[in-house]
Image (tube, helix red, strand yellow):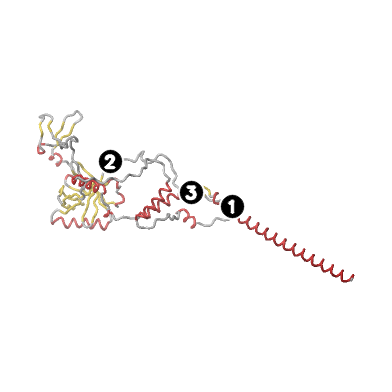
Amino acid sequence: MRSIWNGAISFGLVSIPIKLVNATENHNVSFRQIHATDGGRIRYRKVCELEEKEISAAEIGKGYEDADGSIIPITDEDLASLPIPTAKTIEIVAFVPQERIDPLQMDAAYYLAANGVPAAKPYTLLREALKRSKKVAVAKFALRGRERLGMLRVVDEVIAMHGLLWPDEIRAPQDVAPETQVTVRDAELDLADALMETLGEVDLETLHDDYREAVEEMISAKVEGTEPAKAPEAASGGGKVIDLMAALESSVAAAQAARGEEAEPAKVTPISRTRKKAQATPKAGATPKAVGGKKSTASGAKKTASSSTKKSTSTAAKKTSATKKSAAKKTASSSAKKSTSTSTSASRKRTSA
């Protein structure tokens, strides 16, 4: 890989000669500007406005435009002679835990390669020190005409450096969060947790640029004179209000189907209920506590109604049983009376005979 900058790492009094190499590469499909009518290329020519003629790259330099519009020429020698130690040196200023670095500050990534045999020992020393400390180095360096911040860390057996934005280059997230106050229910959070669990983790090596592949296929189809594939119709959301619970449940089912699992309704165990089971059982007569911001009056009413229904059913059953027993006793008594009457009548007839 071709180096884009040569210098040294300043590690206290230790100097490590290094070469800076780009750690990333761009795979985007590039387009040219053309004249839409006839397809001719649109080109830009660099012309000197004083001489009104095209200038070659070797004749082009740098200049600073002053407030009054005048141009002050700046040469590479002017920049190289600046009285700062980072002109040709990556100066380490501190070692901090990586969590201290805000991901918003991350910029371009580079590999730092040891430049020459004498650099191997101090390079390895810094690499192993970073490994053992489990920290990253914060450094300052100058590149492309400006001083920058950098973060040095170990990737495999190489020291990598991430360019960092200065703290004052990060915008505050003002007026970005929703202004409307909304309440998220526990059941919605539980379904969101279930969806996250179903989607699970992913091997980043398996991810690829679908858009770039589609562009390349479309270009190939045009070259071959065939019809490019049509894009599927996107679902029309249009900012409409949706049923969040139904959308979450459908998302869980779709994620399960994508993973080859049988799509079933999400079985969610709410976190809030699990925590309540661990708490002590409230004493009899205690006032019910709030659940999700509302008192459990409805739950209590349902339990009371259920209990009343059971008692009413039991009472009705007892009354029915008592009624049947009473009727049986009356029938038996009536039968006994009839039998006694019949016996008495028969006895009287015998006596009179």
Residue 14 is left or right of residue 200, and the answer is left
Q: Residue furthest right?
A: 352
Point 10% across, 33% down: residue: 54
Q: Label 3: state its secondary structure.
A: loop
Residue at the spot 15% in from the left edge and 55% down from the top edge: 119
Crowd rating for badge 3 (residues with CA inside 10 Å; few <14, some 14–19, many 20+) = few
Q: Residue at x 75, y 65 (%)?
A: 332
Look at label 3 and name its amino acid: Gly
Where is residue 328 shown, x and y percent of the image?
Answer: 72, 63
Q: CA distance from mark 3 to mark 1?
A: 23 Å
* Residue 78 located left or right of residue 260: left
Q: Disc 1 to disc 2, how far (Cα)? A: 63 Å
Indicate which label's residue lies in the foreground, 1 or 2.
1
Task: Return the residue found at the far front.
Answer: 353
Nearest the eye: 80 or 85: 80
Q: Earlier in the sequence, mark 2 or mark 3?
A: 2
Give the camera-side residue of 81 and 353: 353
Q: Which residue is mark 3?
A: 292
Nearer to me, 110 or 337: 337
Residue occupied by mark 1: 305
Find numbered disc 2 in the image and state the secondary structure of the residue it sits on. helix
The answer to whether one can see residue 303 in this image is yes
Q: Position of residue 252 (x, y in %)?
A: 39, 52
Single out the mark in the foreground, 3 or 1.
Answer: 1
Disc 2: CA contacts within 10 A as few (<14), some (14-19) or many (>=20): few
In percent of width and height, residue 248 lies at 40, 49
Q: Quadrant of residue 142?
A: top left
Amino acid type assigned to the residue bearing label 2 in the image:
Glu
What residue is shown with label 2? 169
Q: Amino acid at mark 1?
A: Ala
Q: Residue furthest top?
A: 68
